[in-house]
Image: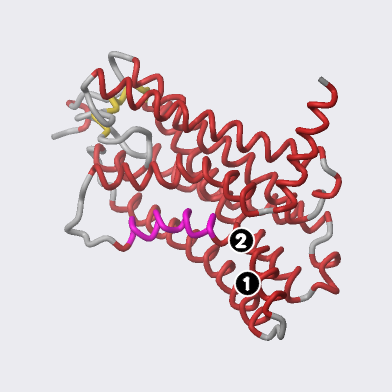
Amino acid sequence: MPMENQTKVTEFIFLGFSSDPQVQIFLFLVFLVIYLVTLVGNILIMLVIGADSHLHTPMYFFLFHLSFVDICYSSITVPTMLMNFLAEHNIISVNGCITQMFFFNLLAGTEVFILSAMAYDRYAAICDPLHYTEMLSKGICVQLVSGAWTIGFLYALLNTVFTFRLHFCGPNEIRHFSCELPPLLQLSCTDTFTSQVVLFTSAVMLGAISFLLILISYIHIISTILRMSSVQGKQKTFSTCSSHMIVVGLLYLGAFIQYTKPSSVSSVALDEMVSIQYSILTPMLNPIIYSLKNKEVKTALRNILCKFKFLK
């Protein structure tokens, strides 16, 4: 059918999780609590790091930026989702959808490379402590974070440019709660082979490079820990990496499920659960993990709360 005879789609409809009003109200409350916990937790981490001079180190510099990314990451999808739970028609314009997808990809790409920088920080601190301040000077830390944002921007721009070349002529129902590229490709009435290749190649390269950087860092870290003679020293050193390892595991778990599931398994529910895990739950859990597993953060938070009580 010629393109000129087809109706051009100008907006998409999110089908969401359920059309049952009672279920929607319940989900609204659940995700509202998750979003508020995400905001409060990450803002607290940022305030604690900014207020306590003892935390003005490379590790907490990266954690500060990770918390900022998590706030933005969650804010891209959750507020729209909350409004859709209460709205009669869950509509978003095509340009609005592509814009949401751009920022989603930008923040996803930035986050994985900030985690890579955090792994390098642990490698430098454990494997080469004498040169730690040289390896992670303030200038190098800024360059690593700037590099993470640049890579995220290029990754998002690359996929967005190819998305703008697509034409949508119906249907316009997205079987998802947010705008991600795979569901959009299914709605295109033009050939999507190039976009699929670009998406798969860029996503695999982004994930593989960041994961390899983290893996290489931890191979050296584990090797150094195993050479330690003191059991207490091993436990103390390993505890400094445990929070980061848990966060990395949570982030890559969703990607692992998404890209290793059999091609015969095509479940909308599974795709939504994976998306919820890495785009909504992980940003909420990150500050909880770092505050519970990190004595310095807990001490700094306790000191700030004590000062606040004293002022009152």
249 up-or-down from 267: above or below: below
* Chain-order first, disc 1 or disc 2: 2
Q: Which residue is mark 1?
A: 217
- Residue at the disc numbered 2: 116
Q: Image point 60% across, 62% down: which residue?
A: 242
Mark 2, secondary structure of its residue: helix
Q: Secondary structure at mark 1?
A: helix
Name the residue rendered at 80%, 67% in the picture: 135
Amino acid type, label 2 = Ser
Circle 2 crowding by C-alpha within 10 Å: few under 14, some 14–19, many from 20? many
Q: Amino acid at mark 1?
A: Ser
Asked whether 103 or 69 is in front, the reply is 69
Marks 1 and 2, Cα distance to the nearest angstrom? 9 Å
Q: Residue at x 21, y 21 (%)?
A: 20
Residue 139 among those drawn in magenta: no
Circle 1 crowding by C-alpha within 10 Å: few under 14, some 14–19, many from 20: many
Residue extent of the magenta highlight:
246-259
Name of the residue lying farthest toward the left: 1
Residue 303: x and y, percent? Answer: 80, 39
- Image coordinates for residue 308, horizontal then vertical, percent: 79, 27
Q: Position of residue 16 (x, y in %)?
A: 28, 30
1 and 2 marks in contact (CB < 8 Å): yes
The residue closer to the viewer here, 215 or 60, is 60
With 143 as the anchor, is 160 left or right in this view? left
